[in-house]
Amino acid sequence: MSNSLFATGINGLVGSEFATQFANSYTIHSLDIANPLNPVDITDKASVVTALSADPTAKFVLHLAAFTNVTDAWNQNGDTSGIAYKVNVTGTRNIVEACQELGLHLIHISTAYVFDGEKDDLYTEDDAVSPIEWYGQTKADAEAVVQESAIDWTILRIDQPFRSDSFPRLDIAHRIIDGLNTDMLYPQFENHYFGPTYINDFSKVVDWVIRTKTTGLFNASSGEKWSDFEFATAIANNKGFTTEIQRSNLDEYLKTLDRPYQRNTAMNTEKLQSVIDFELTPISKALAEIV
Ligand SMILES: NC(=O)c1ccc[n+]([C@@H]2O[C@H](COP(=O)([O-])OP(=O)(O)OC[C@H]3O[C@@H](n4cnc5c(N)ncnc54)[C@H](OP(=O)(O)O)[C@@H]3O)[C@@H](O)[C@H]2O)c1
């Protein structure tokens, strides 16, 4: 089997960890809008088809590129000519159509923000999507484009990803460490919940999909549910900070916010864990691996 694959968004927070971790396993052809020599904008279908035709031995497209700023996306709410919709939905449609033309398997990265966050329990793959803000809506629309296609596809949903090393755009764990270091950590919600995704493990999930050619929809976070306060406290304890973490109440915050915000985005990962050939790292252990 060829060890080449195509990827979008590979220089981002999530993709760059996969590229580093599996540098010896895969040759990655990057469709990168910021490449000065060969910029590829996924909203331009012709560029996408040209880029995905460059290596006939490559059989997978790892699609991470997205408009990921949730607040900026909310400012475009409902605007299907806005950049968030264009990148997340039109861009994904271009990639799906190119995969159809070229016979490529698409690994599409999605988010727990496709849910409304009103469920107390963990979200499963059987729960219907119910986005409440524009980023989540565009990602849900993108999932639909992928699922309605006739190509081989795998959708991997993640939530609040963090990695063991530091990346220029700080992830949730490094934002907390930064706040503790500078004594400027915001009070942490006791009643907002999420399902942290350890990007080092998620990279192994992507490798597993490629190795096994597995298709379908998978929640690919840790399968755990943490409140912001619990997560920050665990990081502080782990890293030897003596700072007392301040508590706050999501309901009070929501009164000041002009956009909807999901209360709980933790996902059940039993489906994934029943098929992968390695163990996911418990989040408490992953926090200890952060440098
Ligand atoms: N980060 C999170 O909290 C989170 C949570 C759940 C799901 N996800 C999903 O995980 C995936 C990766 O997220 P991330 O945090 O790694 O993203 P990120 O750091 O914001 O990176 C996004 C990437 O997309 C690229 N991109 C944006 N517009 C493009 C365009 N028109 N054409 C080509 N490339 C374009 C960017 O390229 P440039 O760098 O050149 O601009 C960048 O490399 C996304 O699909 C996201 O929806 C992320």
Image (spheres, rainbow, N blue to C red):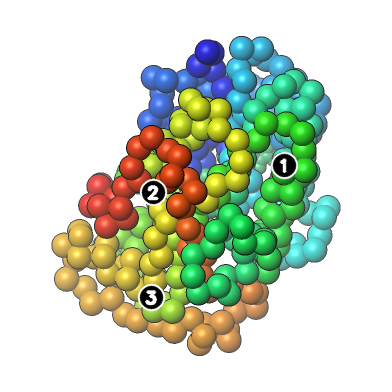
Of the residues under marks 3 and 2, which one precedes in the sequence?
3
Q: Which residue is mark 2?
A: 198
Could you tell me if the residues under marks 2 and 1 are in contact, i.e. CB atoms within 8 Å?
no
Which SS class for mark 1? helix
Q: Which residue is mark 1?
A: 146
Residue 38: where, in percent of width, then height? 66, 23
Kindly tell me whether mark 3's CB lies below 8 Å from ligand 1.
no
Q: Amino acid at mark 3?
A: Gln
Say if 28 sits above or below 237 in the image: above
Name the side, left or right, on which 182 lies relative to 123: left
Name the side, left or right, on which 277 lies relative to 48: left
When asked about the image quadrant of residue 118, the answer is bottom right
Residue 75 seen by the camera? yes
Residue in the foreground of this view, choosing between 186 and 238: 238
Which labelled disc corresponds to residue 188? 3
Residue 18: where, in percent of width, then height? 44, 34
- For the point 43% across and 38% down, the residue is 276
Say if 6 sits above or below 3 in the image: below
When asked about the image quadrant of residue 215, the answer is top right
